Structure formats: structure tokens, C-alpha cells
Amino acid sequence: MSSWVIVPAAGRGSRFGGEVPKQFLDVGGRSLLAHTLDALASHPGIGGVVLVLGTEDAPVVPEAVLHGKPWVRAAGGDTRAASVLAGLRALPESVRPDDFVLVHDAARPNLHADDLDALLERGRMDPVGAILAAPVRDTLKRAGDDGGIDGTEPRERLWRALTPQLFRRLQLGRALEAADADGIAVTDEAMAMERQGARPLLVEGREDNFKITTPADFARFEFELSRRG
Ligand code: CTP
Ligand code: MG
């Protein structure tokens, strides 16, 4: 069994800064996006890729990173959720309404195959679906308006949501449409599903499946690549 993956890559990288959106920057001889696509498409559990791009973006995607998997482009929207919805609509007919599909950030290139294995294996057994996530390790403080500490939050049940996230095509589309209609900005797929009363499964993933948000994250990925050799 294999699943299609939607890769939202239509962001502008405002926190990263610079002229070129972060996903198109070169690292180790190819774009960040190419690294992400390679990590996904090289996995046997991936059946195809929907690449969601900004309307003004036309990056060169080397065929090699798609490993012969079928792929299509879609035009992204103003928010990540809108881009994912555009990606869902661009899936081929062969992906049925009840089939599981993955969503994975273009800006998260350091995905390891064992995490994808675990998510696919456990998520496909769940009626709703699942997300990769990592437990919160730091002590959490609640800040007051003056910058002083108002208290310490228990962290025992808190997790950081990562991607990929795995849901059924039709259910995810309906959940994202409902959030949009209600004017709620969801920041991941699970949040849209939770609003529908669903309880997606948390699958613990590696800490190093980090998202590149700032130049410091980019430097961290460069370091990871150099370690891989
Ligand atoms: N994304 C997208 N469409 C948008 C916004 C984001 O496809 N309208 C994608 C980004 O390209 C990225 C992923 O969603 O791969 C995660 O978003 P984020 O890290 O927030 O990237 P940006 O939105 O580009 O960065 P920023 O929020 O700093 O502007
Ligand atoms: Mg963003």
C-alpha cells in the first residue's frame, strides 16, 4: 500500500527574510525543497507527490529526487491551510475519498525514513489518522503583560506537532473547508480535524525533524548534511 503526499511549498518565508523563499535556497548542491522531496519520494510508502507552489514560483525540480513517482503541481493560497486544500483538490482520481494522504512541510527537510515508517504503520490502523509529534522537554512559563512570569504550566501532556500528518482525503478536505468557512486559521491538519471532534493519534517522532523557520535552522540543516557526509 502506498499514499500520496501533499507538500505545501507556497510560503514566502517572512520570518526567514531574504529575497528568495527559504525552500528554494541551495544547501549542499540542491534546494531545500529538493531535499524534502527526496526524503519523501525515496520511501516505498509514498505513491505520489502533490507539490504546492506560489503562483509566481517555478522552481526547477530535478526528476531524480522524485524517484520515478508520479507528481503534479498545484497553485498555493495565502495561508498554509489554503495551500494544503489546493493540494488536496489536485490529487488524482485514483486517490479515493477514504484513502489516507500525507501532508509534509517543504521546509522540513530532515525527515528520516523510520519516522515515516512509524507514522504510516500506526496511522493507517487508526480510524482518524495520526501525526508525528515530539514531547515538550523544556519547562513552560506563562508570561504576564509586563514580561514577568505568571506561572509554570505542566508540560506532561504537551507535545509539539510535527509533519508528516496522515488523514483520509475526504475527511481532511471537509475539516479544512469547515475551518475556512468558520474563519479559523488552523496551523496544522490535526487542528482542523480536532475541530470536527476527531482525536488523531500522536506518534512520537525524532527531535531532529525540525522546520526551517530562521537562518539559524538553516545552518543546523547544513550541519546535519555535513555530518551525513
Ligand atoms: N506554506 C504554503 N503556503 C502558505 C504558507 C506556508 O505552502 N501560504 C508552506 C511553507 O512553504 C512551508 C510550510 O507551509 O513549507 C510551513 O510554513 P512556514 O514554515 O510558516 O513557512 P512560511 O509561511 O514560508 O514562513 P513564514 O511564516 O515565516 O512567512
Ligand atoms: Mg508561515
Image (cartoon, rainbow, N blue to C red):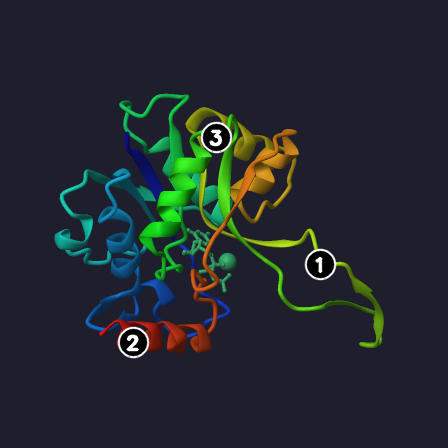
> Which of the marked residues, 1 or 2, is nearer the chain's N terminus?
1
Residue 183 falls left or right of residue 63: right
Which residue is pictured at 53% across the width and 51% down the height? Answer: 133
Which residue is pictured at 47% across the width and 53% down the height? Answer: 205
The residue that mark 2 highlights is: 227
> Which of the marked residues, 2 or 3, is nearer the chain's N terminus?
3
Q: Relative to 33, is 68 above or below?
A: above
Q: Position of residue 220 (x, y in %)?
A: 40, 75
Determine if residue 130 is in view.
yes
**Label 1 – label 2 distance at C-alpha:** 32 Å
Q: Please tell me which residue lies in front, 73 or 200.
A: 200
Which label sits in the foreground, 1 or 3? 1
Callout 3: CB less than 8 Å from ligand 1: no
**Label 2 – label 3 distance at C-alpha:** 39 Å
Q: Which mark is residue 37?
A: none
The residue that mark 3 highlights is: 173
Query: Tag 2's secondary structure?
Result: helix
Q: Position of residue 35 (x, y in %)?
A: 27, 60
Residue 36, quarter of picture: bottom left
**Label 1 – label 3 distance at C-alpha:** 31 Å
Q: Which mark is residue 155?
A: 1
Q: Amino acid at mark 1?
A: Arg
